[in-house]
Structures are given as structure tokens and as C-alpha cells.
């Protein structure tokens, strides 16, 4: 299949970065994402781990839940929903963590494009390579893989993280850096 | 093994080998004269330091039966695996001056993780053994009291997994071990059919509506009789289909027929639902802690005093919630995620759930059955051994009485592969 044009991929990553900025303004870890179907944004998400006190509420999970909710409302069956996911493309500002990378494989997403790498938790090449799917596929067991490419507007994604860590994470148990006042843009 | 006994085993951060079959490496060694020992060892440390073999003793001391003096043998250097006759020139130069007679021998490649392994290693070549120093309770063994409460909580999980469902699902019970209190107990919600009629997800019903009794259940309410039944139920069903256990078949969610009436979600594995439930409990019992922080944050005078704000001070939250459990029970402290909590799972979690439990800062994981298709705690991946992660939990498997454990692993492989 034809890869997304550079111009388009920057446009979509721009939407994801917008979500990440919203997260930063809400004092959340600045990661954002959008999910596309045939070039149209059908869901977006941003990290909401602090406000929910649920450290699994990553941007990807927020966007996925929005879609599942909508499709269930539309009375789609599980197999129709699986069919839908197999045509979806995700743009996320930071490499999906091991949890999200697994989840995207379970759902059978088509493609994932990310900004900066994630050398602590990354599940698409940095720590584990879950986008290759599982090796135990001989019996048709599943273990779906997906196409994955990083490095799209990575500097922008990293600069948001820098802002976040400079302002300090107010919800970390013991602050590594003091929390400072920040002008809201 | 006593068939009535429950056994708890630690699943370490590295793969284990049977003590008799540990991986080995070849090395060049030579008997040396005791008066050369110091000089030669000092010299060898410079030219052939054994960086990855710190657990291996450089010199072996053997008392021979008919000699009064001990015999010393020293490791000269690593030997190439494929070629037996090439010794590095640096080492070759030592042969004549020190009257060496090099030979090839084997040493264990990895440091021993148990006393049994260590004893076996020393038969080959002496090594040193440092018992694990993690500071998590249980790795060095459990007290009788702890064992009993761990087994009881595992029974709660098994109860949930079997009873009240049309098919077997995974179950997750999050526990605060310091007060032996259940924080959350949930099952898979991946398939419409797997949730029983009265089970409702944390999403559809707020914590308040569900009633606190669900969440703060005392362990004493668990009757042994009912869980005995469920335990038997699970053992019978291990020979039938386990295709509805979410973590065992995470890619299979779309194969189910659907039912418009009930909630389902492809990623709502038991651990994910239990994490959501425990965070809902946190938000309900301590509703203002985030708000109060944000208020402080807008006051410049507080800005350079982070420590003050970081304290998870529950007093201000309690003032407005005097009807809530937090005030009635001084033992309830505001948690930071699931720090200090245990989770009990019937099946080893998949990699998604295992990583979710890292994120949520779970302290210890107990599971009963391994997950050969997607397990994240030793079966496929081993997150407790991924050094780069910012949090590490201790992992234990509970061997249930009356289960042939080796056979079980094979059965599971067959069952999941056929489904």
C-alpha cells in the first residue's frame, strides 16, 4: 500500500500534538493522539492519568474507548468492530508503551505513526517489539502485527515533555523537581 | 507434594533453569604453585578480567586426599566456544614463567538465584551466591499467617472466575495487604456472555451506587465451602475450553456473537477493570485531593514549596465527606495509585495487563496458572525483569492443591491453540 505522504503525516501529527498540548495545560503528561479512518479523524485522545488517578489512561486508550463506545452505540457486532479497527491508522506523539502497543495488536490496528521514541516503556521497538505481533501464530492464534514508523515531528513532542518536566509533575509521589509556576498559553 | 497444600513460588526476573541444567561457558584453567598465586591473579585481572563472570571464583582450592597442601587452580581466560586450541598470546606468554599447564574446563554462565543452583554450580567450579536483596516481602518466604491470607485471596479470585459466569473468565482481586482489605475485585468484560447479570462495570455504575461493601469486603466473608466448590469447578473446566479467558486469547475477542443488552469491550481484561475500579474508589474516597492541589498551584506563595503540596493530605478532603468510610476508618489512607497493593489473578496476565500493573505501581502479583500464549510475567515476556521500566513488582505463582502442574502447562497450550 502507498505510504502516507510526508505532508499529510505532518498534518495528522499536528492534530495529535494539539491533543498533547491540551494534556499539558491540564497538568497531564503531554501525549496526544488521533485515529484516522480513510484519512478522516474519527477519534482523538490525550493522557488523563492524573485526573483519573488511573495510570493506564494513556492517550491511545482514551481514543480507543471513544471508538468502541461509539461503535457499540451504532450496534456494530464484535466482528464488524474488528473490521473497522483493521482500517484504522493511529498518530501518536510518543511511541506507544508496552501496554498500548499490546492493546493495538489485540485490536488489529492497521498502522501506527509516532513522534519521539520511548526508551523507558516503548513497545514498538524500544524495549519490546509488540508491533511484530506474536510469534505463536502457526495455528491461526492471532498475534496480529501492524506497520509502525516513528520520528514524525519528534522534536515538537520532546519539547512538550521538556515543558512538562520543567513545570514538575504535581502528582508524582516524591517530586524529583520542584513544581514551578507556569504561564498558561 | 502434599495434595492439600497450597504452595507459593517466586517467579524471578530472569528465566530459571533446573539446577542440573544451567548454561555453562568454557574457560582455560591451570593448576598453579601456591607461591605464584598472588602475582598471577593480579596479572590476570589486568589482562583477562572476567567482567561478565563476577559470580565465578577466579581460584579454586582443593584439598587432595594424599597431600597436606591444598591444590590451587586458576581461571586464565575465556575459551573460544568453537576452537579449542587458540589461547590469547598475552596468556600464552605466562605459561613458561609460571609453569602452567592449561586445560579447558566449564563454569556456570549466570549467577545462582537459589541455594540449590549454587550447590550444583560449585560441583563444576566454585561460584559465589548472594540471595536476592529486593526489598519486597515474600521473596525470602512467607510466614504461616501471610500464606493463609494469600491463599484466601486467591480463593476469592477463583470464586469470581468460575461462579456466576456461563464460561470461565479471568478474575482480578486488588488487596491492601497492610490491612488485608479488598480494594477492587473484577472479572473480564471482554465478552457479553462472560459478565453475569448483576455484574456491572465500574464505568456504568459510579462507585457510590455500587455500595462500599463490594469494595471493602473483609476477607472473613469468604466461606471455604463455596470456594472449594469453585476450585473444583475450575479444575474440571481446565480440560474444556478456556477461550473466554481474555488474557489467554487477547486476539480472539471479535469471534464472539454479540448481545446488545450487555456491556463488553475488547480490552476490558480483569486487571484493567480492577485498576479502573480501584481508581474509582480513590476518586470517591478522596474527591478533593486533585482540586486542592490545583488551587494551591495558582497561589504563587506556595509555588516554591513543593513538598507541602505533595503530601497527600486527606484531612481537608475528609471534612466535606464525614459520612464516608475514610473518616470512620482511620486505617484508610489516600493511596498513590496502587502503591503497596497486591493483585490476585487466576491466570498470568497478558503483556498489556502486566504493563498496566507496572503503570499502576502494584507491589506484588500472585497468579495460579501460566499463560503460554500471551503471558507477560515469564511465559512470553517477563516485565519484572525489564530493567528500563520505572517500577518493578514481585511475581509469585500459587500452585493449587490437586493440580498436576507440569501436565497443566501442556494442557493449556493445547486448549488455547485449538480454540
Image (spheres, coloured by chain):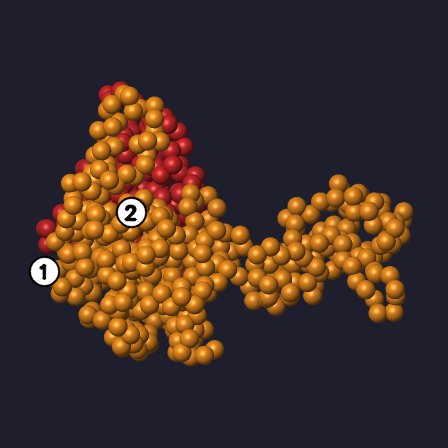
Chain colours: A red, B orange
1 or 2: mark nearer the eye: 2
Q: Quadrant of residue A160?
A: top left
The residue pinned by badge 1 equals B261
- Helix or strand or loop: what does disc 1 sit on? loop
In terms of depth relative to the viewer, which is nearer, B132 or B234? B132
In the image, is residue B209 above or below residue B65? above
The residue pinned by badge 2 equals B333
In the image, is residue B322 above or below residue B398? above
> Which x, y percent locates residue B45?
74, 44
> Which x, y percent locates residue B78?
71, 51
Mark 2 belongs to chain = B
Determine whether, in the image, residue B35 is placed left or right of residue B112.
right
> Which x, y percent locates residue B228?
29, 76
Q: Quadrant of residue A22?
A: top left
Q: Is residue A99 visible?
A: no
Label 2 neighbourhood size at 10 Å, few (<14), some (14-19), many (20+)? some
Determine whether, in the image, residue B10 is placed left or right of residue B34.
left
Identify the residue at horizontal 32%, vertical 44% (top origin): B336
Distance from label 1 to label 2 (Cα)? 38 Å
Determine whether, in the image, residue B203 is placed left or right of residue A28.
left
Identify the residue at horizontal 34%, vertical 29% (top origin): B306
Mark 1 belongs to chain = B
Amino acid at each position: 500500500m502507498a505510504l502516507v505522504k510526508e505532508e499529510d503525516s505532518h498534518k495528522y501529527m499536528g492534530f495529535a500534538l494539539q491533543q498533547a498540548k491540551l494534556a499539558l495545560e491540564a497538568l497531564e503528561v503531554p501525549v496526544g493522539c488521533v485515529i484516522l479512518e480513510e484519512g478522516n479523524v474519527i477519534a482523538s485522545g490525550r493522557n488523563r492519568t492524573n485526573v483519573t488517578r488511573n495510570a493506564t489512561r494513556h492517550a491511545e486508550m482514551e481514543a480507543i474507548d471513544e471508538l468502541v463506545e461509539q461503535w457499540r452505540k451504532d450496534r456494530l457486532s464484535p466482528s464488524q468492530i474488528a473490521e473497522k479497527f483493521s482500517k484504522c491508522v493511529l498518530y501518536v506523539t510518543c511511541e506507544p508503551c508496552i501496554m498500548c502497543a499490546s492493546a493495538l495488536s489485540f485490536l488489529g490496528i492497521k498502522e501506527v505513526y509516532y513522534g519521539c521514541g520511548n526508551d523507558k516503556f516503548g513497545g514498538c521497538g524500544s524495549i519490546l517489539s509488540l508491533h511484530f505481533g506474536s510469534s505463536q501464530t502457526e495455528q491461526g492464534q492471532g498475534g496480529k502485527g501492524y506497520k509502525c514508523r516513528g520520528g514524525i515531528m519528534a522534536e515538537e513532542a520532546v519539547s512538550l515533555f521538556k515543558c512538562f518536566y520543567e513545570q514538575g509533575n504535581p502528582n508524582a509521589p516524591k517530586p524529583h523537581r520542584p513544581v514551578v509556576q507556569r504561564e498558561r498559553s | 507434594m502434599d495434595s492439600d497444600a497450597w504452595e507459593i513460588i517466586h517467579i524471578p526476573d530472569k528465566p530459571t533453569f533446573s539446577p542440573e541444567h544451567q548454561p555453562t561457558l568454557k574457560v582455560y584453567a591451570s593448576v598453579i604453585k601456591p607461591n605464584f598465586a598472588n602475582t598471577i591473579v593480579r596479572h590476570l585481572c589486568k589482562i583477562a578480567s572476567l567482567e561478565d563472570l563476577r559470580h565465578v571464583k577466579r581460584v579454586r582450592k582443593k584439598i587432595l586426599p594424599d597431600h597436606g597442601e591444598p591444590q590451587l587452580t586458576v581461571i586464565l581466560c575465556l575459551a573460544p566456544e568453537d576452537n579449542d586450541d587458540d589461547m590469547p598470546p598475552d596468556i600464552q606468554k605466562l605459561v613458561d614463567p609460571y609453569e602452567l599447564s592449561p586445560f579447558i574446563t566449564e563454569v556456570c554462565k549466570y549467577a545462582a538465584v537459589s541455594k540449590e543452583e549454587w550447590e550444583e554450580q560449585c560441583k563444576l567450579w566454585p561460584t559465589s551466591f548472594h540471595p536476592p536483596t529486593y526489598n519486597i516481602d515474600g521473596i525470602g518466604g512467607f510466614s504461616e499467617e501471610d500464606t493463609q491470607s494469600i491463599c484466601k485471596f486467591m480463593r476469592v479470585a477463583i470464586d469470581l472466575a468460575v461462579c456466576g459466569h456461563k464460561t470461565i473468565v479471568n478474575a482480578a482481586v486488588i488487596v491492601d495487604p497492610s490491612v488485608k482489605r479488598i480494594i477492587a475485585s473484577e472479572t473480564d468484560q471482554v465478552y457479553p456472555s462472560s459478565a453475569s447479570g448483576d455484574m456491572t462495570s465500574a464505568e456504568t455504575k459510579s462507585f457510590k451506587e455500587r455500595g462500599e461493601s463490594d469494595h471493602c469486603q473483609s476477607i472473613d466473608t469468604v466461606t471455604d465451602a463455596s470456594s472449594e466448590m469453585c476450585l473444583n469447578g475450575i479444575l474440571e473446566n481446565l480440560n474444556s475450553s478456556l477461550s473466554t479467558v481474555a488474557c489467554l486469547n487477547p486476539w480472539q475477542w471479535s469471534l464472539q456473537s454479540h448481545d446488545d443488552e450487555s456491556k463488553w469491550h475488547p480490552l476490558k481484561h480483569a486487571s484493567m477493570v480492577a485498576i479502573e475500579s480501584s481508581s474509582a474508589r480513590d476518586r470517591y474516597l478522596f474527591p478533593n485531593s486533585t482540586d486542592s492541589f490545583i488551587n494551591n498551584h495558582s497561589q504563587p506563595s506556595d509555588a516554591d514549596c513543593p513538598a507541602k503540596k505533595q503530601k497527600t493530605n486527606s484531612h481537608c478532603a475528609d471534612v466535606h465527606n464525614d459520612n464516608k468510610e475514610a473518616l470512620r476508618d482511620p486505617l484508610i489512607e489516600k493511596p498513590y495509585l496502587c502503591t503497596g497493593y497486591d493483585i490476585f489473578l487466576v491466570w498470568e496476565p497478558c503483556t498489556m495487563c502486566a504493563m498496566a500493573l507496572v503503570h499502576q505501581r502494584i507491589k506484588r502479583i500472585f497468579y495460579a496458572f501460566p499463560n503460554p500464549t500471551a503471558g507477560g510475567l515469564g511465559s512470553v515476556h517477563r516485565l519484572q525483569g525489564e530493567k528500563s521500566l520505572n517500577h518493578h513488582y514481585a511475581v509469585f505463582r500459587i500452585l493449587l492443591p490437586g493440580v498436576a502442574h507440569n501436565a497443566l502447562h501442556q494442557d493449556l497450550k493445547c486448549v488455547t491453540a485449538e480454540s
